[in-house]
Amino acid sequence: MVGVDAVAEAMAETSRRAAAKPTRGGAPNAMFLCAAAETLPGLLAGAADEITVHYPWGSLLRALASPEVAVLAKLAALGKPGASFTALINVQPLRDAAQAGRLGLAGAALLHDPGRLAAEYARAGLERLRVRDVTGEPVPETSWAKHLAVSKREVWRLEATTSP
């Protein structure tokens, strides 16, 4: 397992838990990398069976929701052929016009043009995109996921597979 975040502090708790003994929930094969998605894949190219993005913000949220093919292609390149891709998106910043404007997400295809969204994901090497509302469903064990669940924020799951 490789955890990637542009902000090292965001991975501190997960890294601490992963360092525990396996009998106490640790993950001896975990590695954490402080990097932006835009800088990947490098040495990680073609290594992943699964690519998971939890609640992106800023440029990564824009890349997933607008979408930006170049960034999506870098994410897709992390996966082996047929790898699964999953992203959980907090939809609130897309629905709030002022916030969407500040983040460069006004008119994001995720909300406004699902056909273009699927076509751009496919161009990036992420095929068979499915988008569904998962608000209220069980969330990953992260503090942000718990916050979104408690505040009843709308969450969507994007699922695709990397091209063969």
Image (cartoon, helix red, strand yellow):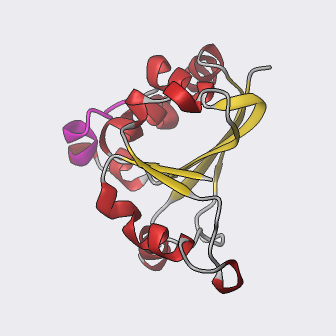
Tell me if residue 101 is in the magenta stretch. Answer: yes
The x and y percentages for residue 150 are 46, 80
What residue appears at the point 41 percent right and 75 percent down from the top-left corner?
147
Q: Is residue 40 left or right of residue 123?
A: left
Picture quarter containing residue 13?
bottom left
> Looking at the magenta stretch, what is its main secondary structure?
loop
Q: Is residue 148 left or right of residue 23?
A: left
Task: Please state, as top left, top right, bottom left or bottom right, where the C terminus lies in the image.
Answer: top right
Give, as a single range, the part of the protein colored magenta.
99-108
What residue appears at the point 22 percent right and 37 percent down from the top-left corner?
101
Picture quarter containing residue 11?
bottom left
**Is 123 above or below relative to 74?**
above
Q: Is residue 67 left or right of residue 22?
A: left
The x and y percentages for residue 8 are 32, 56
**Is 76 above or below relative to 120?**
below
**Is 34 above or below relative to 136?**
above
What residue appears at the point 64 percent right and 68 percent down from the top-left corner?
27
Q: Mark yes or no: residue 108 visible.
A: no
Of 146 and 79, the residue lying toward us = 79
* Total marks placed: 0
The x and y percentages for residue 132 are 66, 49
What residue appears at the point 33 percent right and 46 percent down from the top-left corner?
6
Q: Is residue 100 left or right of residue 41?
A: left
